């Protein structure tokens, strides 16, 4: 029999599904790693990556997102509060839940802007921005797309 408490939502803030690239590093390790943001709220985020970290690890994360025709980012400092390992044939990745510990005022405004956009569309109206990096990437530009540039595609499926 399932535990009735396990199905109760404990989050105090709504979370929104997103698909955005991010860079992160542990405060104990200077190497920069990459991952993919899966959902976001005012208090934390969920992301996927191939790197193995322990629960309790402090991380600095930079989330990249499209801002009109340019690329912008915001930085958060957080703590890994849970992790899960996934296997799919030859693929192994980790999923991490991160609680925010610090967000600067400027970055909080960017985060609020992203969340208000997703809040407007609602969690049921799956609105995601896909970030695709093609080989030999140079400066991102959408004015004259070529095979060496970054392309943003909006998915409006419901």
Image: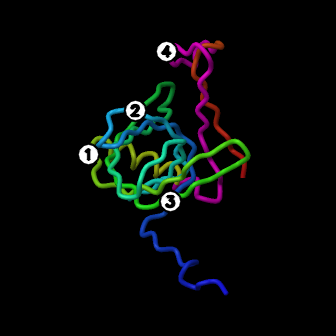
Q: Which mark is residue 139?
A: 4
Locate residue 44, reporting x and y percent.
41, 56
The nearer-to-camera label among 1 and 4 is 4
Residue beneath label 3, please? 15
Q: Are marks 4 and 3 in contact (CB under 8 Å)?
A: no
Measure the alpha-carbon separation of dots 2 and 4. 20 Å
Measure the alpha-carbon separation of dots 1 and 3. 20 Å
Q: Nearer the viewer, residue 120 or 158?
A: 158
- Say few, some or many: other residues with alpha carbon within 10 Å of mark 1 (under 14 / 14 to 19 / 20 or more): few
Q: Which mark is residue 32?
A: 2
Residue at 46% across / 51% down in the picture? 115
Locate residue 80, reporting x and y percent.
40, 55
Q: Which residues are magenta?
A: 119-145
Is residue 5 rendered to the left or right of residue 127?
left
Residue 42 appears in view:
no
Magenta segment, prevailing SS (helix, strand or loop): loop
Measure the alpha-carbon separation of dots 1 and 2. 24 Å
Q: Is residue 122 above or below residue 113?
A: below
Q: Are marks 1 and 4 in contact (CB under 8 Å)?
A: no
- Say few, some or many: other residues with alpha carbon within 10 Å of mark 4 (under 14 / 14 to 19 / 20 or more): few
**Quarter of the view holding residue 8:** bottom right
Residue at 59% across / 58% down in the picture? 123
């Amino acid at each position: 029999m399932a535990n009735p408490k396990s199905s109760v939502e404990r989050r105090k803030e709504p979370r929104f599904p997103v698909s955005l690239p991010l860079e992160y590093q542990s405060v104990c390790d200077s190497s920069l790693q990459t991952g993919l943001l899966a959902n976001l709220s005012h208090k934390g985020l969920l992301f996927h990556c191939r790197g193995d970290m322990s629960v309790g690890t402090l991380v600095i994360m930079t989330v990249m997102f499209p801002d009109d025709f340019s690329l912008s980012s915001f930085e958060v400092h957080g703590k890994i509060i849970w992790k899960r390992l996934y296997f799919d044939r030859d693929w192994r990745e980790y999923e991490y839940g991160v609680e925010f510990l610090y967000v600067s005022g400027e970055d909080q405004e960017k985060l609020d802007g992203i969340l208000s956009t997703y809040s407007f569309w609602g969690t049921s109206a799956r609105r995601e921005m896909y970030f695709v990096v093609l080989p030999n990437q140079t400066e991102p530009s959408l004015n004259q797309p070529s095979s060496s540039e970054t392309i943003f595609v909006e998915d409006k499926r419901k």
